[in-house]
Image: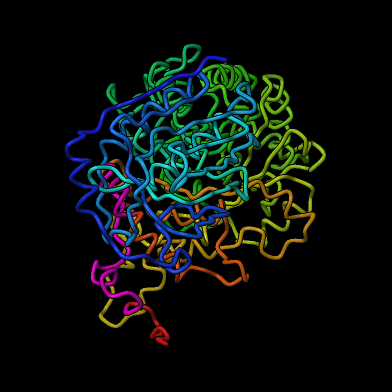
């Protein structure tokens, strides 16, 4: 087994000076642990100390295409980042020789990056008696999580690292991700790469890419090139096969799966630019004047749904699915299935004829699922649908055509109630409850000439124009238990969760601040939980750690928004709702 040795020198004169000058008092590891986000599941630090990195510090790892790249990246980072914490951990610098090596061992170098891959790792950093730190993992992907932890334990200039500790870590949930909508507004590839980088440093492992919708079709497909030619916002607002490959490969280097979503049969108005014959109610005003909400054509501006009664629909859909599955190697394929609006189908003559013969809209959806689901699964994909295909009150399919072994459902309505309904039906579930995990909520509405904003002073503003208000604070996200109300058996069907940024009012200018550090809060809750060893919610303890972690993310180029004034960090406990007890 070949090993890769990576090294970058530190200036020896600076190291020597630092050894003589550095001295700080001892601390309690329980009271003042160094910041690691998300918090490890096991963190043993009996005698907290720090140790210098050697001028010739190296990382030794078995060769692996992506792990070797990651090890190289982390080595550069720990020796050049020179992170200065808001408050330096008061750790004694040991008199032991500087740390020379981080030695990585892997049990299985062949495990692919896929759902359920083992991400556990164990990290030991000695304070004396050895100049080697060790990182052991079952897979390369677990080793990447351990490298991130190691990087967060390094700080200052010259670089020093927390020592005398042992960390054993494994996530509670296997699926931890972020949904980003790139149809309503376009995001350049560089922004997507920055998102993947931040996903990885927060130990999330999925970028769920909602690529297309009624508003635009930015993905260039070899079999259906006219979809992007006519459906993208512009020539510079497309994702080519090379762009996709770049994102997918970048994800592999960071241990992040890229799961594509091509929403259908609803949310497909942009398809009509190239194929008007297969889309119903395209380019109609979304909510006709004087019409009831039930008679709308879409739930927001941007109408159009694929017509399952047209044979041409399936020719185009199969071309799209084939190309997308080729471009995205992940085992999950998200096929959408949400928000099918009855009136959009009912205005089509072929649908009217079908209904006049005692057919139903649910039967039309079943035709679509029966014609597309087997094709997607034939490509060795597990299909993810939004919950609507099973739970919508008007248009839904029979569970008999959604085999649980091939289908995962993603919840977004009614919080834990719909999660309960899905798992009670025997399906695995990904939780994205809009009550807790929608990052676009609370920013008002985007509709023009909206009279609700023209009211006399003192008028109740209602939801402020945001259907899913209020704004989801990091504490709201952190405290949500995604298995709430489930039995032990039902809880096993919860794969994990995804926060979502829908882009009606977002693009690359606000992407970082809308997502981070709120997604970090979900990251810890799904990695090691939101409770301490006694079962008590630990959001109060997490506040200072998240403040510090947000500050470090910013230093790494992620524009995460602040959660408190810095004054709160300088005055611990003074920004709580209840004054802390002082003994």
Q: Quadrant of the C terminus?
A: bottom left
Image location (x, y in percent) of residue 529: 57, 58
Q: Residue at x 52, y 38 (%)?
A: 206
Q: State the residue in front, 453 or 71.
A: 71
From the viewer's perspective, is residue 569 above or below residue 67?
A: below
- In the image, taking residue 460 as reference, residue 20 lies left or right, namely left
- Is residue 273 visible to us here? no
Magenta part of the protein: which range? 550-574
- Coordinates of residue 151 in the picture (x, y in percent): 39, 42
Query: Which is more toward the observer, 16 or 343?
Result: 16
**Whole-percent x and y of residue 161?**
36, 46
Q: Is residue 5 in view from this perspective?
A: yes
Q: Is 377 placed above or below 149 here?
A: above
**Residue 138 position by quadrant:** top right
In this rendering, is residue 229 above or below 513?
Answer: above
How many numbered discs? 0
Residue 444 or residue 177, whichever sits in front: 177
């Amino acid at each position: 087994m070949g090993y890769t040795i990576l090294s970058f020198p530190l200036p020896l004169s600076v190291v020597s000076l630092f050894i003589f000058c550095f001295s700080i008092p001892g601390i309690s590891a329980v009271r003042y642990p160094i910041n690691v986000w998300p918090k490890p599941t096991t963190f043993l630090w009996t005698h907290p100390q720090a140790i210098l990195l050697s001028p010739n510090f190296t990382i030794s790892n078995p060769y692996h295409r992506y792990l070797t790249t990651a090890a190289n990246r982390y080595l550069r980072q720990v020796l050049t980042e020179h992170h200065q914490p808001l408050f330096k951990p008061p750790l004694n610098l040991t008199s032991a020789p500087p740390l020379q090596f981080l030695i990585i061992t892997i049990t299985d170098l062949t495990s692919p990056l896929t759902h359920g891959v083992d991400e556990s790792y164990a990290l030991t950093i000695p304070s004396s008696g050895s100049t080697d730190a060790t990182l052991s993992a079952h897979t390369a992907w677990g080793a990447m999580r351990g490298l991130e932890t190691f990087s967060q334990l390094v700080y200052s200039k010259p670089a020093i690292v927390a020592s005398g500790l042992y960390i054993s870590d494994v996530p509670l949930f296997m699926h931890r991700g972020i949904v980003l909508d790139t149809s309503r507004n376009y995001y350049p590839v560089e922004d997507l790469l920055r998102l993947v980088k931040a996903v990885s440093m927060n130990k999330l492992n999925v970028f769920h890419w909602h690529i297309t919708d009624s508003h635009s079709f930015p993905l260039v497909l070899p079999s259906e090139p006219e979809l992007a030619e006519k459906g993208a916002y512009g020539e510079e607002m497309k994702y080519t096969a090379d762009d996709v490959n770049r994102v997918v490969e970048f994800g592999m280097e960071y241990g992040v799966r890229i799961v594509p979503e091509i929403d259908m049969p609803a949310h497909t108005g942009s398809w009509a630019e190239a194929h008007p014959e297969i889309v119903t109610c395209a380019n109609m005003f979304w909510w006709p004047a004087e019409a009831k909400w039930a008679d709308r054509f879409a739930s927001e501006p941007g109408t159009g749904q694929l017509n399952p009664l047209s044979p041409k629909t399936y020719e185009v859909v199969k071309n799209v699915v084939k190309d997308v599955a080729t471009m995205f190697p992940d085992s999950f394929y998200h096929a959408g299935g949400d928000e099918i609006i009855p009136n959009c189908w009912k205005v089509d003559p072929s649908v009217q004829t079908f209904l006049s013969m005692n057919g139903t809209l649910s039967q039309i959806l079943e035709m679509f699922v029966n014609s597309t689901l087997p094709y997607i699964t034939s490509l060795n994909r597990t299909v993810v649908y939004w919950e609507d295909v099973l739970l919508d009150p008007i248009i839904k399919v029979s569970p008999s055509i959604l085999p649980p072994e091939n289908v995962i459902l993603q919840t977004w309505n009614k919080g834990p109630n719909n999660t309960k309904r899905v798992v009670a039906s025997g399906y695995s579930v990904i939780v994205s409850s809009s009550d807790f995990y929608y990052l676009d909520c609370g920013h008002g509405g985007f509709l023009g000439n909206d009279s609700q904003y023209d009211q006399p002073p003192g008028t109740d503003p209602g939801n402020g124009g945001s259907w899913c208000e209020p704004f989801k604070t990091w504490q709201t996200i952190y405290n949500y238990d995604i298995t709430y109300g489930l039995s032990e058996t039902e809880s096993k069907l919860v794969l994990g969760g995804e926060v979502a940024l829908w882009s009606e009012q977002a693009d690359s200018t606000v992407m970082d601040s809308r997502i981070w550090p709120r997604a970090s809060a979900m990251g810890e809750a799904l990695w090691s939980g939101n409770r301490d060893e006694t079962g008590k919610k630990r959001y109060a303890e997490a506040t200072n750690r998240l403040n510090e972690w947000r500050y470090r993310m910013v230093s790494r180029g992620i524009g995460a928004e602040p959660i408190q004034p810095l004054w709160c960090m300088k005055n611990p406990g003074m920004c709580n709702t209840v004054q802390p007890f002082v003994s």
